[in-house]
Amino acid sequence: MSNNVNSLLKISNLAVSFDTVEGSTNAVQGIDFELNKGQTLAIIGESGSGKSVTASVIMGILTCPPGRIKSGEIFLNKQDILKLSENDRRELMGNKIAIIFQDTLSHLNPVFTVGAQIAECFEVHKNYTKKESWNKAVKLLDRVKIPNPHKRAKDYPHQFSGGQRQRVMIAMALALEPDIIIADEPTTALDVTIQAKILELLAELRDERNMGLILITHDLGIAAEVADKVIVLKNGKIVEKGTLKDVFIKPKHTYTKELMNSIPGKLNQKYKRNDNIETKPILEVKNISKSYDTIACDNVNFNLFRDEIIGIVGESGSGKTTISNLILRLIEPSSGSILYHGRNIFDFDKKELFNFRRKVQIVFQDPYASLNPTMNVFDIISEPWIIHADFLDKKLHQARISELLYSVGLQPSDSKKYPHEFSGGQRQRIAIARALALNPEIIICDEAVSALDVSIQAQIIKLLKDLRNKFSLSYIFIAHDLPVVRDLADRVIVMKSGKILEEGNVEEVFNNPGNPYTIDLLKSSPSVEKLLSN
């Protein structure tokens, strides 16, 4: 127990294991830390480091079995909550500690209005009347800056944007006025401007209520923006802890140094495009527009050259993915044309379109959803050759797959494995190998690294650079992570509401943005560099 009068939470020697068919696995191994009033503690580390397991134990939502608390003490306001009965602990959790999860759609009931879900907290824990609970819910929605809260309280989760749903989750967390909020990757899927607003709101609420905030994240930039103290986890152990500046500016542990060196902008030197390869663009987007109920894409123009990487940035709904779908000819434009080596792809006949799709491939954001779990790696990578049967003789499949796996940093023996046997970063490498199978000229990367840990992200970015260098590939790299775009791209396009607001050399746009929206994006982007430059 801590003698610190400001202490809210103190964890000592916490160890957690999981029982599997292959034996016991240590997920958390003897960790210690303390959280004070008005303080933000960032817990950083890669997937599998023990971050979310630690949060689950604190909240009392660890599934036992297979999880098992082997040792430890968790003092909340000088009371060891691990010694409480299940009922007492459940009562304590709602009132003293709340959690905000990453995936809002999974944690909000789709068949109840958001107002009803917030109001339920007051009805169950405070015994308020339905009317009182509803009024409290509306006030909370107003507090987390949901416009027109009286009306929006009657709406369902799917009627809110991702950022608004996260605000609803924050409102639910605040309902019982907890002393501590645990935010588990609360901004991962959000645009940078929305990210910044959510982080600003959490900091504001922390200061207003003198709460403790535990921020679980793999994004070092986010930690650098809001944290006072930092814990670095690896394989369930704390490898380094201290103040934000101590850990980020003067890291001592090798692993922390690796994480810091993986930050976009600190990666390998930018690859210089060979401007003599081609003078004509391989792809020309000309006056492209696409309308649904609203305008998704509005008179967009740009060229893509061989051996070039174009970054496309902007908020959700800006038209980024619409552009990629048009280039892949998955949708037809309302007007305009896209020329591939001088010919409009929308004039292609069936055979021409079939051949065109050999040359333009895509790598999606989610490496878990983009690979068929019933197929092994051999079948996944060889599938394009089965579709394009004239491309490669079956006798050569194994040799070519081995070559492709080598090129993305995997082993030929991996061809016999299934997707569930790989990490997220390895799955993305498999997806890239599949995209390379038909020797494309253009690869579209649609948020291809946003779901990955920072060190894995760095590996994939380096891989994309190396493959571009080796094969003179052209990329259209769609992302909301601006430092990644700056590190990878030659040119950048900034989009908003279907329009291109700014376009130019990546360093020129990032160093001297000309449009107010671009300036706002850059200011909103979480960055470790801001901390390091102070």
Image (spheres, rainbow, N blue to C red):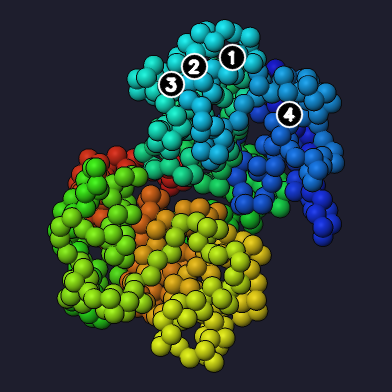
Quadrant that contains the C terminus: top left
The answer for how far apart the CA atoms under marks 4 and 3 are is 37 Å
User: What residue sits 38% from the left and 70% below the top?
Assistant: 361
Q: Nearer the viewer, mark 2 or mark 3?
A: 3
Q: CA distance from mark 4 to mark 2?
A: 31 Å
Image quarter of the N terminus: top right
Q: Which residue is mark 3?
A: 153
Looking at numbered disc 3 in the image, what kind of residue is underneath it? Ala
On screen, 429 above or below 37? Answer: below
Rendered image: mark on residue 451? none
Q: Gap in Å between the C-alphas at discs 1 and 2?
A: 9 Å
Mark 1 vs mark 3, CA separation in Å: 15 Å
Residue designated by label 1: 122
* Identity, as a three-letter code, of the amino acid under mark 4: Lys
- Image coordinates for residue 106, horizontal then vertical, percent: 55, 39
Residue designated by label 4: 10
Q: Earlier in the sequence, mark 1 or mark 4?
A: 4
Q: Are marks 1 and 2 in contact (CB under 8 Å)?
A: yes
Of 171 and 297, the residue lying toward us: 297
How busy is the neighbourhood of tag 1: few (under 14 within 10 Å), some, or many (20 plus)?
many
Tell me whether circle 4 and circle 2 mark residues in contact (CB < 8 Å): no
Tell me which label, 2 or 3, sits earlier in the chain. Answer: 2
